[in-house]
Image (cartoon, grey):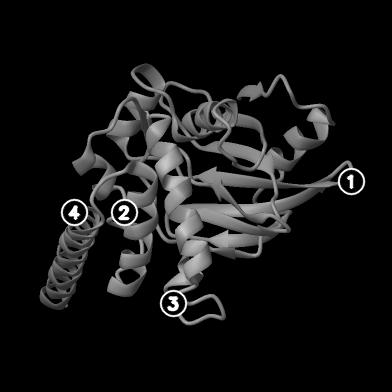
Amino acid sequence: MNIVFSKKFKGDTEAIKQCITDFDTSGKKFDERKRNSLKLFEVGGRVINVKSFKVPNLVNRIAYKYLRSSKAARSFEYAHKLLENGILTPQPIAYFEEEGVLFGQSFYVSNHLNYDLTYRELCEASPYLGNKDILRAFARFTYSLHEKGIHFLDHSLGNTLIVITDKGYDFYLVDLNRMKFGPMDFETRMNNFARLSPRPEDIAVMAGAYAAESGDNEKKVFDAMLAAVQNFQEAFYKKKRLKKRLKFWKR
């Protein structure tokens, strides 16, 4: 097993290694997904979050072994980059990779964050639906990402955790394995909102706040943001309909 701990981590490394060894039989399930799973473990008085990435397909088993960094390694690296740039994410602790002729299973370990809501609750049935203060703060947060050259490719409903503070809102990014770094043009910035709220009223609020920060024309920002969302939604539901048809013909 290839094991890398953060230089900033001060804690029981052996206990965390044991969590990985016992992952399938211990820990508390936090989020079960088709591709990956999350579990919580208590170690030394703290709660840690362990994300298990499933064994990839054959092509990626070769690629992750010899050509590129694994999802776990990238999550670890990008978490440190975010924190170095003043962007919040749960504190990274370590990553683990099974060694062999081909790449196997991998794990990313971080501190567990107690949060109040995710972005998803801003655009779905919840007490926070359409909350303008949070939407404006989120748009300003996204602008700060863009200005720092951080292109979070998975900027989507469940990947921003929100903590309500006395001063406002803190935004923490999770699911970090897909990012790019460097200057972003206007179109790329607007497309970064494509997988967020599809509600025009939410888009209008975010567009107004983003335009106020960037100095761009508010209508221009709104039109571009709305077009990005609509294009994504159209492609998403087209793909969904195609999958439904394929399942029908396989019966």
**Are discs 1 and 3 less than 8 Å apart at CB?**
no
Residue contact at pointers 3 and 4, CB within 8 angstroms: no
Q: Choose the circle earlier in sequence order: 2 or 3.
A: 3
Q: Is residue 70 above or below residue 139?
A: above
Quarter of the image where the N terminus is located: top right
Query: Which numbered disc, 3 or 4, marks the residue that appears first in the sequence?
Result: 3
Circle 4 Cα neighbour tier, 10 Å, few/some/many (<14 / 14–19 / ≥20): few
Question: Disc 1 designates what residue?
Answer: 45
**Of circles 1 and 3, which is in front?**
3
The residue under label 4 is which amino acid type?
A: Lys
Give the structural element (helix, strand or loop) at label 4.
Answer: helix
From this view, report whether residue 90 is shown above or below residue 184.
below
Residue 102 in picture, x, y percent from top left:
41, 25
Mark 1 vs mark 2, foreground winner is 2
In the depicted structure, whether residue 145 falls above or below residue 13: below
**Nearer the N terminus, badge 1 or badge 4?**
1
Is 126 displayed left or right of 109 in the figure? left
Give the side of residue 6 with respect to residue 129, left or right. Answer: right
Q: Amino acid at mark 1?
A: Gly
Q: Nearer the viewer, mark 1 or mark 4?
A: 4
Toward which corner of the image does residue 161 lie, by quadrant? bottom right
Q: Which residue is mark 3?
A: 124
Depth order, front residue of 48/169: 169
The residue labelled by disc 2 is: 193
Name of the residue lying farthest toward the right: 45
The quadrant in which the C terminus is found is bottom left
Q: Secondary structure at mark 1?
A: loop
Q: Amino acid at mark 2?
A: Phe
| Mark 3 or 4: the one toward you | 4
Figure check: 39 above or below 148: below
Separation of marks 4 and 2 at Cα, in angstroms: 14 Å
**What residue would you read off at disc 4?**
220
